[in-house]
Image (cartoon, coloured by chain):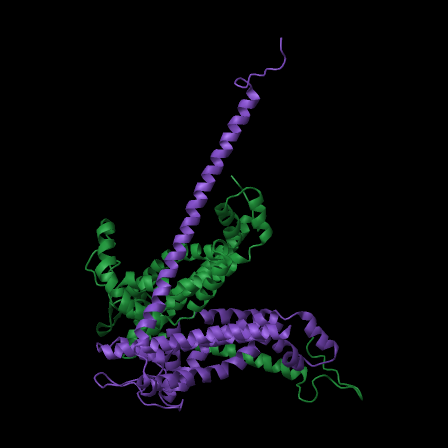
Chain colours: A purple, B green
Amino acid sequence: MSVLTLDPANDPILERRRLIREAAAASVRRRKLSSTIALGLCWVFLGLAVVPLVAVIAYTFAKGIVAWNADFFTQPTKPAGIPDGGVSNAIIGTVIIGAVATLVTIPFGLLGGLFLAESDGRVASAIRFSADLMTGVPSILIGIFGYVALVKEFGYSGLIGAFAIGMIMLPIIMRACETAIRGVPGHLQEAGLALGARRFVIARRVIVPAALPGIITGGLLAIARGVGETAPLLFTIFGSQFVTWNPTKPMDALPLVIYNNSQQPDPTLLSVAWGAALLLMVMVLALSIGSRVLAAYLQKERR
Amino acid sequence: MVTDDTKPTDGERRPGGRRSLPNGAWRAILIVVAGLFVALVVWFLYSIVDQARPIFSQLGIGWIFHATWNPNKNQYGLLPFILGTIETTAIAMVLAVPIGLGTALALAYLVPPKVKAVLGSAVELLAAVPSIVYGLWGLVALAPLWREYVEPFLSSVLGWTGLFNGSDDGVGLLLAGTILFIMVLPTMVAISRDVLAVVPREQVEGAMALGATRWQVLRKVVLRDARTGLLGAFTLATGRALGETVAVALVIGNSDYIAHSLKAPSATLASLIFNNFGEASGTELAALFGAGLVLLVIGLAVNAAARALVRGRVGAAGGATSVAVA
């Protein structure tokens, strides 16, 4: 009469343990398999995302670099059939329009950002909402607004183009400034107040310098976004084959050249369009890279 | 609290010296600037509504949903363009959501740190590439590929669905949707990756300690925790796709009729405005501003839906993140 059954084959406890172990192993196998499949899919999607983006850059570079020569940078746009055309008028136009838009929107956006960062009331949240609304407005609507509101009155001009581009940049800059300013530690401002400094002085000497990296990044990204826009320019600056530094006249811009030339059957004009696309892309990438480098430098400088 | 402009007593000097503004004046400047911004927004909205008014007073509201656009016969139906806008955006987002999310997950959690840094900043830079460049590339490089290979392939494999009838033109709804997808992808990935990367480490590690596989951690912890931010990325990308003008106008083929196939040429509200604004006058001009209003309303509706979804989801989940490892 043995109390202990030492026969492993018939032990109910060992049997149950075995079943549990098998079920657990099966679960792990199943979960590992689905994990492998899903993660593999993520890798595939990463590949699917990289291919077209690399293709855009590589194609633009290959097609654009052959259009880059001395004439491209020094001659204005010329109609189909006339050789040696360039984009000098469009480069000047893009730079002037971008510069005017930036000079107006940066201080405007900075003050707006300061207001938003200091205010939490209903008015401020309404302004915040309208800024977000404006960020989402299709740029073509800004273009036709510029036309009916200003071009009808004053005629086509680079200034109105800068106004339209500025309307796209302003909400971006405002919200970026607000975020940067809100990130400034509160004790810095309180220290200023404790010293008896006025709010203006605190803003100028404490808040803005401390928030500068964020402000610069936001500003340069907004410029990069602004100078690449086509739709707001078509109905405001109109395009012009004359080289002019005068923003009260109709001007040309790189995005306009790309669009207009893409509609022409002439292969030379299409080549100029690729050159302009590459130039625009290089300008925009330089602005975004520049903003990052500058922000990182300022960040380091403070420590 | 801002107007405590106490006068300095004798011998006391304020930091900042003479070249400073009293608090009241400074606050006034800020308020004026904020007011100017509001005025600009109101001016913008008022102008669009005001310019669109003639067509609403002439034809009421039903004209928007008519199918015929023929300014010569005073017909300004926007239905083809509303459908074109929704279809191109839908194609773009159907591709951008899985591919963008998968890429963002891979960038945030799967790739080695060095690759992560390089690819991460590359994606952010790509988000700044002007949309006209994507449009030109689509027109010159992709359209022939679509005509010769992609569209015949899709017709032979998926022809039975009836979505791919008609001739292979290259330009059309499908190409426009693809270009929009490629255009919004960097935005989608950059924002999603930022949102995914800030999921608290303790939650990820906790799930791993419970024996969850990597995919279970990503799906049940990371994606669930980040869903509000991900919805934000989706909304922003959708907004850009809805409103993109020139890149779409280059590759969609610009037809005023309702497309009965994904290969057919079509037009969006934005490309309609872009292509016709230069020559339009009178009622047609008003109709184009009306199209702009419809576009604004669609954008707002997407935004509102996303906000409502965020509120509903967060409410339903009670704000807590439950981790079930099964």
Residue in the picture at 74% in, 76% down: A194
Which picture quadrant has residue B8?
bottom right
Q: Tell how many labels.
A: 0
Residue at the farthest top position: A1
Q: Is residue B34 visible?
A: no
Q: Nearer the viewer, residue B233 or B254?
A: B233
Residue at the farthest left position: B167
Residue in the picture at 72% in, 74% down: A191
User: In the displayed structure, does residue A95 sit left or right of residue A59?
Assistant: right
x and y percentages locating residue B3 in the rendered image = 69, 79
Q: Nearer the viewer, residue B84 or A37?
A: A37
User: In the displayed structure, does residue A260 sit left or right of residue B229?
Assistant: left
Which picture quadrant has residue A17?
top right
Q: Is residue A117 above or below residue B88?
A: below
Residue in the picture at 52% in, 73% down: A293
x and y percentages locating residue A155 in the rendered image = 36, 88
Quarter containing the C terminus of chain A: bottom right
x and y percentages locating residue B229 in the rendered image = 51, 58
Q: Is residue B182 above or below residue B204?
A: below
Quarter containing the N terminus of chain A: top right
Q: Is residue B23 visible?
A: yes
Q: Nearer the viewer, residue B180 or A15?
A: A15
x and y percentages locating residue A268 in the rendered image = 24, 79
Residue at the farthest right position: B10
